[in-house]
Amino acid sequence: MAGNGTVQRWDHTEIRLQNFSYMWTISNFHSIVEERLGSLRSPTFSIEANDKWCLTVHPNGLDEVSADYLSVNLILLSYLKSHVWTKFQFWIINDEGDKTETMRSLKAFKFMPGHGCGFKKYILRDFLLSHAPRLLPHDQLTLLCIVSKVQDSVSISDWNRKPGIQVPSCTLADELGELWENSQFTNCCLVVAGQEFRAHKAILAARSPVFRAMFQQDMEESRKNRIEIPDLEPQVFKAMMDFIYTGKAPDLDSMTDALLAAADKYGLESLKVMCEVALFRDLSVENAAHTLFLADLHSSGQLKTQTLDFITAHVSEVSETSGWKAMVGSCPHLVAEAQRYLASAHLPFLEPPFKRLKRS
């Protein structure tokens, strides 16, 4: 019959970032610190015609917690819309014109007119002043801020007006997930801390090389189809099994460390990378040493490199944390590796905090 054709449409949404750099030089910096001025504000700048931004610097911090630090902020003064999503990064420009002491937002923040965001503990004031010849040439502090503004999404459509047949979306992950959740047609039992979980040997073997090896070997556990799983909590094991059956990322907020260990042990590379991404997303000065330890323990190369980059950028703060001081005694090889990483980054002026720690 005429008129029964199907119209098909394909859509593609593209999120675009607009990058803008702004450099601000503050003269007579020592005098500003000595006079204990509350804050300094940069001239206004614009990324596009309908917005206005500025930077602020608080030489003596924003509050009691940050009183020993230089605080920096990016502020949206005006904008036609109610808000804009933006990422940002700060650097100090040294005496050779190179960027150093970087600190960046790990996610986009929602900026509204009259509000801002930044880093209360950008750099220790004493550290900055003690390295004045390099970081404050001619008694000038030069800050570089790069703003990455999320542009409106662009939708690109492609119409095909020829009659066709609509192909349904694949539901394999959901269907396998139901087999796992409902324990249907299972043929093996996995025992975790006394709890029994029914599963499917073929699916486990297809997804994990470690399970595959278990089932291929002529082991008593394999013959009885009953396998003890040591060193895992039941909730961690269940999250791992959810991933094995569906391929979907589990809730990583409360068990990222344990899931990383499980993914590494059972050869689940995709889950391992998901854990690395979560750990990097939550990376901070306080947990940098622990994250470096985890990355080294589980051979997470990308996470280790990113963590070393972060430590290099925040060495004066990281070296004062209890986690780093504990690692000096327990993992000296990681401390040595961080020192080599600093040396290769050509930042010799950042070495004293590590040297000071090494003697303690």
Image: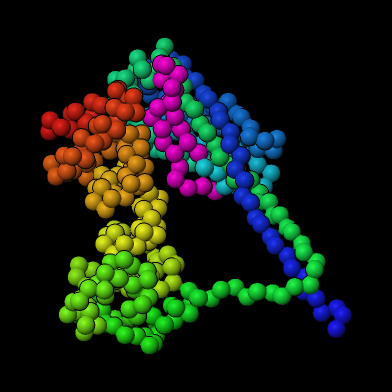
* Percent of width and height locating residue 247: 43, 68
The image shows residue 316 at horizontal and vertical percentages of 29, 32
Q: Nearer the viewer, residue 35 or 242?
A: 242
Q: Is residue 12 visible from the viewing direction of this image?
A: yes
Give the quadrant of the C terminus.
top left
The residue lying at 65 percent from left, 42 percent from top is: 79
**Residue beneath the point at 23% across and 51% down:** 297
Magenta stretch encompasses residue 99: yes
72 to 84, vertically: above or below: above
Q: Decide: is 37 above or below 272.
A: above
Residue at left offset 65%, top offset 74%: 167
Q: In the rendered image, which quarter is residue 266 located in?
A: bottom left
Percent position (x, y) of residue 306? 37, 42
Quadrant assignment for the N terminus? bottom right
Query: Which quadrant of the view contains residue 22?
Result: top right
Left or right placement of residue 47 versus residue 299 in this view: right
The number of callouts visible is 0
Tell me the residue at 70%/62% (across/down): 10
Residue segment shown in magenta: 88-113
